[in-house]
Amino acid sequence: MLAARDVFRLFTTGVALITTAGRRGPNVMAAEWTFNVSYDPFLVSVHIEEGEATHAAIVETGEFGVSMCAEEQVVAMAFAGHFTGQETDKMSSEVFETVPGTKIKTPLIRGSLFTAECRVVQRVEMGDHTAFVGEVVAFSIEGERKPIVLHRGAHHLGPRIERGTKVVVAVTPSTATRGATVTVDGGPLPRSGG
């Protein structure tokens, strides 16, 4: 019989190393549920269970660091995700090389796809997790790196899937009469992002 956990592994996500610097000292955890949720202002949301050391540190300090995992950080990701900061000083491990934040007191992880320094602007309880929405107050990109992609385990980002050369036709407005004739004439369609 399938369990919900079997379905969870079918989602495809990236993973970030979330850093904090609360009264217990600096900490890091791996968080799959880390997303950009607004362009302007630049907002990032991270979803964390209430019992986690990272949850308590974000509530205490109102800030967190996001270091999106690059392929070279698969060991760091696994280590950060399998131990709790309540029992293990994960930042004492040589697997993490930190850099200080420029706008927040929280350190960031060197070698990541990118890093973002976030100040909490909203906190939303969502089932068994809390969504902390942070405004990005500083960010950096460290050269060209490839992300870790999670889907039934860690994977590489594969080649881009090319869209075929099909013509898609729709009638606008949607209140047009059914059965009306639509004529398509012309050359190649212009590329559009929207």
Image (spheres, helix red, strand yellow):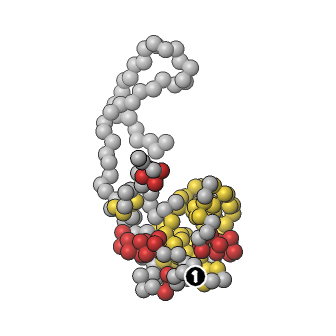
Q: Residues within 10 Å of mark 1 (few under 14, many from 20)?
A: many
Position of 130 with respect to 73 (left or right) is: right
Secondary structure type for disc 1? strand
Q: Amino acid at mark 1?
A: Pro
Q: Is residue 123 above or below residue 186?
A: below
The answer to which image quadrant residue 155 occupies is bottom left
The residue lying at 42 percent from left, 48 percent from top is: 2
Residue 137 visible to an observer of this rendering: no
Residue 60 visible to an observer of this rendering: yes
Q: Is residue 187 above or below residue 71?
A: above
On the image, the x and y values in percent for residue 95 come to: 41, 82
The residue lying at 38 percent from left, 23 percent from top is: 184
Q: Which residue is mark 1?
A: 26
On the image, the x and y values in percent for residue 120 come to: 67, 66
The residue lying at 40 percent from left, 38 percent from top is: 190
The answer to which image quadrant residue 101 occupies is bottom right
